[in-house]
Image (tube, rainbow, N blue to C red):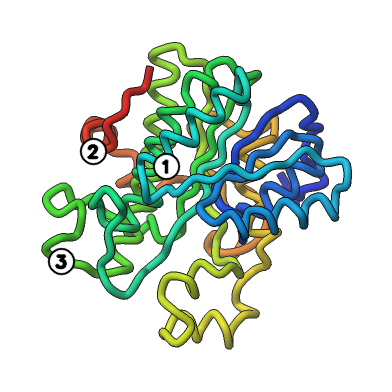
Amino acid sequence: MTNWTGDDIPPQQGRTVVVTGTGGLGFEDSMALARAGADVVIAGRNPEKGAAAVAAIKRAVPDSQVRFGRMDLADLGSVAAFARQLSQQQDSLDLLINNAAVMRPPERRETRDGFELQFGTNYLGHFALTAHLLPLLRKGHDPRVVTLSSVAARQGAIDFDDLQAERSYRSMEVYAQSKLACLMFAIELSRRSKALGWGIESLAAHPGITRTDLIVNGSGRSSLHGRLRRYLWFLFQPAWQGALPTLFAATSPSARDGCYYGPDRLGGTRGYPTEEQPPRQALDSAAAARLWSLSLDLAKVQFA
């Protein structure tokens, strides 16, 4: 895995991919996979940004197969509608990258369905999307699901007594919880796929500390974190490099089902892809099973 880059992605011709997120890491994932020959569906809530992402990829890779699908992860009805439309367009799906996220809105906000925004978007929306797309994935060729976590998950905890941060909202703690939940979901999906014979590999990845608009869009440009992002940009690795652990997990024959990948340098904050030990709390199988069961009820989905 030494200095693995996008040039090491195996040919992806014949593989159909869904990537959530039109900018930042999602855009870099989609560009790299389209360049490798995959048929890419970029899923996002903003059609203008989606069209811009598709156009940029087609300019860079004129013969690429890439299209936009409208989906708002903060609206479970929109997630279900996207999955229904995709099911009408194709018979199978080979790769799902659960990437899109919101980070640290300064005040507590809710999704359309009444969930705290970070938990509902980063985790529950992707949980529901994966459930809806499971029948297509089960028909895919060597299907994989890659779910994005964060270095913030190391400090995360699942607060089952206040899962929606209704009693206490601390933006970083809630973000860390959502990203820990994503990591626990990836590991639990791998367990269940093996146990139930779904034939799907599930892996997790994180980008380290990367130069995207995630902080600015969440905390705001004038916030402390927004100013750090703007003035200390050199501390953040470029988006193409932050995307590498995801792309490795998504495409490399060496990537292992149920494992976690991140950058290899400076405590996992930058560098090239390497396998990483998940934080202890992410390996709590009882908590993961509890979260899974609760999420089925919250999202009103089934994995079948």
- The alpha-carbon separation of the residues under discs 3 and 1 comes to 28 Å
Q: Which quadrant is the N terminus positioned in?
A: top right
Secondary element type, mark 3: loop
In this rendering, does residue 18 appear at all?
yes
Which residue is depicted at the point 32% across and 50% down? 120
In this rendering, does residue 25 appear at all?
no
- According to the image, label 3 marks what residue? 168
Q: In terms of sequence position, does the residue under pointer 2 or pointer 1 come before the other?
A: 1
Which residue is depicted at the point 32% across and 23% down? 302
Return the x and y of residue 113 as percentages of the image width and height: 26, 48
What amino acid is at disc 1?
Answer: Ser
* Front position among marks 2 and 3: 2
Return the x and y of residue 33 as percentages of the image width and height: 73, 42
Q: Which quadrant is the C terminus positioned in?
A: top left
Q: Residue 69's mark?
A: none
Secondary element type, mark 1: helix
Q: Looking at the rendering, which quadrant does residue 86 occupy?
A: top right
What amino acid is at disc 2?
Answer: Leu
Secondary element type, mark 2: helix
Q: In terms of sequence position, does the residue under pointer 2 or pointer 3 come before the other?
A: 3
- According to the image, label 2 marks what residue? 298
2 and 1 marks in contact (CB < 8 Å): no
Mark 2, other Cα within 10 Å: few <14 / some 14–19 / many ≥20 = some
- According to the image, label 1 marks what residue? 78
Q: Is residue 280 left or right of residue 56?
A: left
Mark 3, other Cα within 10 Å: few <14 / some 14–19 / many ≥20 = few
Q: Is residue 236 left or right of residue 185?
A: right
Q: Is residue 13 left or right of residue 28?
A: right
Q: Looking at the rendering, which quadrant does residue 162 occupy?
A: bottom left
3 and 1 marks in contact (CB < 8 Å): no
